[in-house]
Amino acid sequence: MGAFGAEDSPRLCKMMGSPAFPLLSKKGDISIGGAFSIHRQISKPSLSFTDTPDPVTCSRINFREFRFAQTMIFAIEEINNSSTLLPNVSIGYKLFDTCGSTLPSSRAAMGLMSGQESTVGKNCSGQSSVHAIIGASESSSTIVMLQILGIFQVPVISHFATCACLSNRKEYPSFFRTIPSDYYQSRALAKLVKHFGWTWVGAVRSDNDYGNNGMATFIAAARQEGVCVEYSEAISRTADRSDQVAGVVRVIKSSSAKVLIAFLAQGEMDVLLEEALKQNLTGLQWVGSESWITAGHLADKRYSGILMGSLGFTLRKTKIPRLQEFLLQVNPSQDPQNNLLREFWEVTFGCSFESGLTGLTPCSGSERLQEISNPFTDVSELRISNNVYKAVYAVAHAMHSMLKCGKKINEACVWKDGFEPQQVLKNLQDVNFTLESGERQHFDENGDPAATYELVNWQRDQAGETEFVTVGNYDASLPNGKQFTMNGINITWAAGSLKRPDSICSESCLPGLRQAAIKGKPFCCFSCIACAAGEISNSTSSAECSKCPMEYWSNDDHSQCVPKVIEFLAYGETMGALLAAFSLFGVALTVMVSCVFFWFHHTPLVKASNSELSFLLLFSLTLCFLCPLTFIGQPTEWSCMLRHTAFGITFALCISCILAKTIAVINAFRATRPANKVPQCSAALQRASVLSCTLLQVVVCSLWLTLAPPYPYKNTAYAVDRIVLECDLGSPVGFWVVLGYIGLLAVLCFILAFLARKLPDNFNEAKFITFSMLIFCAVWVAFIPAYVSSPGKFTVAVEIFAILASSFGLLFCIFAPKCYILLLKPEKNTKKHMMGKK
């Protein structure tokens, strides 16, 4: 259509066929067109391809749409009587019937364009006969009209076309509307179902631009809110009701969703409800669009069992002063030749102006509309009618600005003939006015008004009649979290129940569980799976489990993170207590041996054992037995530095004493041989050797503590559910140098003792030293793989065990035989026996 211009109008008229006749019209200086679905049913012509098809006819008058048309006339008459808005300028109108269908809408558009009521061939003009058009009532009809009228830039202001697609300024530059776009209503409906916890819903829509676009936006918004649509069915107004609509109702009945989103125009809603009554469809929570949610003819008792408790967004309710008086004055006598007025009167009062019709009383024309209650006379829910009213005033204010009318009463307008609709279009974009009710009207850059809605609920009043109660509000201009609000009024739910229905595919997962998707089903259908170890979910319906922080672990039901168990070798546990007991037992045993040696210090055996080195060795063994106590208990900075250095120095002292004893034994026996010139090892030299060997270990430990000392460390790698407190070595090199030095002394001592094991004496101490060093070396060789492979606190236990085992080995191997002689065999404790030959 974009290729046509105004000069192409005659050719376009011929292509479209004969235009429709206006149902209501009046001449004026300015002419405003109107397009309303005054009839709700359209005939289906027989397409036999052999006969000329019958012309399309419309039937079944729609009282609500007729009220919209009369509201437009009322607004025009009110402006014509105004002395401040368009003074001395009269407004005329031409109202056409679109029948809620695209073909009659096309014909109405052509009628509004040409301004001729005869055949097109001769009288189709090249200029629009109206300066602006109010309508149509459906999105599809409006789109069809825009595709025809848009090429002439005739402004179209719709009161009821809500399709979000119409906000596209590139495609529809001449379109305006006084009703918000469905983009906002669809998102509001998604927030509504989410607010009430309905995550599993069904959907039915009109199979046209209104329903398809609105439902697409709703489904996208619902998915963002975590809501799933079980099914989405479409209903066409011209479909075979016995097939398509019946199939839709069967789908609704067989589904598990208890909430139904009905994005339907009134025509499709009527069809669906009739079929729902036939199939006894009950127990559903209906959530409706603004098209039908406040339709009075649906609120009668016929449908109350199905629709009672319905929820939906609609426009704010408004009062239009003097409108009801105007509506009640409508009478066929206003235009006796007007068929629409006659039809309205006949349907309203069930009479006929034609005599001879059986079953119908003659119409007198004096019947009173005041005595009738129908959607035409009902002005209690003026929502869409107010949009018609605002649309007319928007055109009037645009014309007022274009004609440079003054603000003073009766100030003349600068009138000029032949102004184009494009001029009205430009001024319409800039209108900004306030109605008598205080409501402000303006258009944004897309030709849309501000998006505000009321949430209404179908409730019964004390008389048992259905009323639309406002229970909440939605304002798209507010921040996201504040757009949807409830006003605290109690809500009636499905079929009049006071209990809110549940509509979910799967029960919510309790804390400690997460949702797991079920293959082949929407994300709202899930199974509940326990969180893995170390993960929690502390709310219902958690999609994912969250990991606990490093030092925390999940509790038994995985609902919260608790501090991990701190693990270390403590005195209070069995293993720690046993090791501490053995350590103290070793200390006590060493002290007892020291006491025995002190008691028998004057005897030959003690003297022969080098009493000074023996007491020094017993002192070092006491320290060795005390070392494990530094390994037990919670590691601290001081205990970590003390445990390894004390162990290294005390064992270096211990092995140094044994090495000195071994050298002393060898020297003593060499000195007894004939012609042996080797001097005996003096006590000072023994002390110096012990001191130097120990001092070297002290230097190594000092460097270790200075450069990279051991420190407390929380080991979380060994066990995921607990923290093992350990002493990090700081420098593993330092640890293995200390341990290696002790091993070097022990091996040297073992070799010397092994070589001296067969010296000819009844009491040869070298062989006892050999046994002790053999045990010592075996323990520490076995310690290395056990230390490396032991987990957690068992690493400390292995080290303590090695210390105790080697210490007990030294104590028993070196001192047990001597104590045996000192205490049980005193007769052998003589110098003669000591020097005896085997």
Image (cartoon, rainbow, N blue to C red):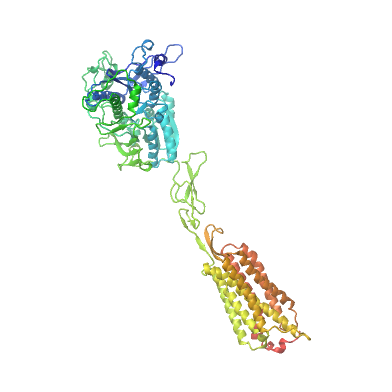
Query: Relative to the observer, which residue lies in front, 626 or 346?
Result: 626
Considering only vertical position in the picture, is 568 above or below 78?
below
At horizontal 30% and vertical 43% (from top left) the residue drawn is: 488
Residue at the right extreme, as displayed:
675
The quadrant where residue 391 appears: top left
**For residue 412, side relative to residue 553 (left or right):** left
Residue 241 picture location, percent across and down: 41, 25
Residue 709 picture location, percent across and down: 56, 66
Residue 532 picture location, percent across and down: 51, 51
Residue 92 picture location, percent across and down: 28, 20
Residue 746 showing in the rendered view: yes
Query: Relative to the observer, which residue lies in front, 702 or 254?
Result: 702
The quadrant where residue 264 appears: top left
Count of numbered labels shown in the rendering: 0
Q: Quadrant of the C terminus?
A: bottom right
The quadrant where residue 371 appears: top left
Query: Relative to the observer, which residue lies in front, 106 or 283?
Result: 106
Considering only vertical position in the picture, is 785 above or below 251?
below
Residue 252 showing in the rendered view: no
Q: Quadrant of the N terminus?
A: top left
Query: Relative to the observer, which residue lies in front, 201 or 701?
Result: 701
**For residue 40, side relative to residue 231 (left or right):** left
